[in-house]
């Protein structure tokens, strides 16, 4: 499946927040690993820029970014967020996808995991 760097980053964030078991849990864990591998350089680059231009937040590991700082970050990233990669994702049938405890916003973000 072709995904942009930014699509992979967003999917990683959603997948990392899930707690599923069985076949759905397996699919989530496998896809999380595949996406992290595929988007590693982009995420490292983006995180480095966030640390450089952002200010530490009260929440450990997070930064606050002003509009001006965000514009600098996006300018430095250029078209890198839109670069696509072919990722070997694991897809599940609709029944398996709906069998877990995913919330509607998680389901919406992870619809790419459902076999067509």
Image (cartoon, rainbow, N blue to C red):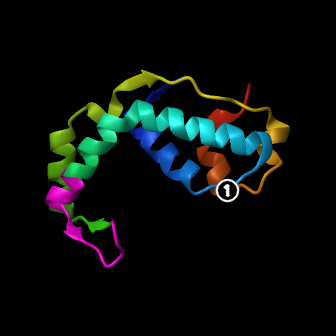
Of 63 and 41, nearer the camera is: 41
Of 110 and 41, nearer the camera is: 41
The residue drawn where x is 39% and y is 39% is: 6
Residue 91: x and y in percent read 69, 30
Depicted 37 relative to depicted 14: above or below: above
- Residue 75 magenta-drawn? no
Residue 30: x and y in percent read 61, 36
Check disc 1 and report its element: helix, strand or loop.
Answer: loop
Q: Tell me the residue that label 1 is attached to.
A: 19
Of 89 and 22, nearer the camera is: 22
All told, the count of numbered labels is: 1
The answer to which quarter of the image holds residue 84 is top left
The residue drawn where x is 22% and y is 45% is: 74
Left/right of residue 101 with respect to residue 108 in the rendered view: right
Q: Quadrant of the N terminus?
A: top right
The answer to which quarter of the image holds residue 50 is bottom left
The residue drawn where x is 45% and y is 38% is: 36
The residue drawn where x is 34% and y is 31% is: 82
Left/right of residue 19 with respect to residue 65 in the rendered view: right
Residue 90: x and y in percent read 65, 29
Q: Furthest residue to the bottom? A: 58
Depicted 70 relative to depicted 31: above or below: below
Q: Which residues are magenta?
A: 49-61
Depicted 4 relative to depicted 22: above or below: above
Query: Callout 1: 10 Å neighbours few (<14), some, many (20+)?
Result: few
């Amino acid at each position: 499946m072709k995904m942009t760097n930014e699509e992979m980053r967003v999917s990683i964030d959603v997948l990392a927040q899930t707690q599923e078991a069985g076949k759905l849990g397996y699919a989530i864990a496998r896809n999380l690993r595949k996406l992290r591998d595929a988007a590693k350089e982009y995420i490292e680059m983006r995180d480095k820029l966030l640390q450089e231009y952002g200010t530490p937040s009260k929440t450990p590991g997070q930064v606050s970014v002003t509009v001006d700082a965000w514009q600098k970050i996006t300018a430095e990233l250029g078209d890198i967020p839109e670069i696509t990669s072919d990722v070997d994702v694991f897809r599940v049938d609709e029944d398996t996808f709906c069998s877990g405890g995913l919330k509607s916003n998680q389901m919406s973000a992870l619809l790419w995991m459902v076999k067509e």
